[in-house]
Amino acid sequence: MKNTFKFYALIWAIGFAIFSLITFLPMVSAEGAEITSSFIIGYIFCSLLFAEQLGCGYFVFKEENLQKVFYNIPIVKTSFSSLVVMIIASVVLSLIGVPNWLVAVICAVIASFSVVSVLKANFVSEEVAKIDEKIKAETFFIKNLTVDAETLISKATTDEAKLEAKKVYEAIRFSDPMSNNALASLESEITIKFKAFENAVVSGIACAETANELLILVEERNKKVKVLK
């Protein structure tokens, strides 16, 4: 993601240069134009939010994990929205001749709101990432077992074994993916029974009884998952 940030930084630099040019060029070119204190205050606060925008961009795009970048995109959006609000407010306040102290207060409020909003967006993205990691951990058992069951179908050496393997695969495939610590013992038993079933399927020996025992365990797990919800 380093190249992404470099590209982002280039766009940021161009944007800031254009902003500064549009801001000061009319003042320089117009005869008798005066750079007022309120104008300077507005420009300083806009520059601060430009800096915040760059910092947010670095924070987001320094991540190598694309999913984390996706989670953090709202941080950049929030910062950008605050920057747009600050620019509009600075222009309006400068044109209507508001007292300097009031300009400073209004700009400070917008800047503070921006910082709080960015921190809030960061907090939300971290919480979403934590929830996502928790879900991945809690669904790993069934997802992993489903892959193993699907692979086992192709390893079956007899028609009977293939038929039983398909039954087991369908049962596991449509099982509730969410696990729970209370199911650890039962899921361990399912893992052991699946291994025994796998050996039977690959060896070509009778596996109907083992498959039935495995299906009973899977059904028991699904019932307990419902109870634990």
Image (cartoon, helix red, strand yellow):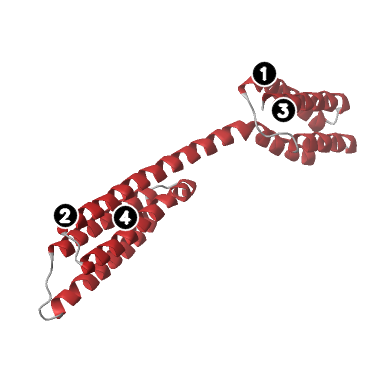
Q: Residue at x 36, y 57 (%)?
A: 80
Give the distance between the C-alpha atoms of the residues marked 2 and 1, in whole angstroms. 68 Å
Give the labeled residue for mark 3.
226
Q: Residues within 10 Å of mark 3 (few under 14, many from 20)?
A: few
In the picture, the disc for residue 53 is 4
Q: Is residue 21 above or below residue 68?
A: below
Mark 1 → mark 3, Cα distance in angstroms: 17 Å
Query: What amino acid does circle 2 point to?
Result: Trp
Tag in front: 2 or 1 = 2
Q: Specify whether residue 208 is in view.
A: yes
Where is residue 119 drawn, in percent x and y?
36, 43
Disc assigned to residue 77: none
Q: Nearer the viewer, residue 155 or 131?
A: 131
Which of pointers 1 and 4 lies earlier in the amino acid sequence? 4
Disc sitting over residue 185 in the figure: 1
Mark 3–mark 2 Cα distance, whole angstroms, equals 62 Å
Q: Secondary structure at mark 1?
A: helix
Q: Position of residue 76 (x, y in %)?
A: 38, 53
Q: Residues within 10 Å of mark 2 (few under 14, many from 20)?
A: few
Residue 200 is left or right of residue 85, and the answer is right
Quadrant location of the C terminus in the rendered image = top right
Q: Secondary structure at mark 2?
A: helix
Which residue in the structure is indicated by mark 2? 101
N-terminal of the two: label 3 or label 2? 2
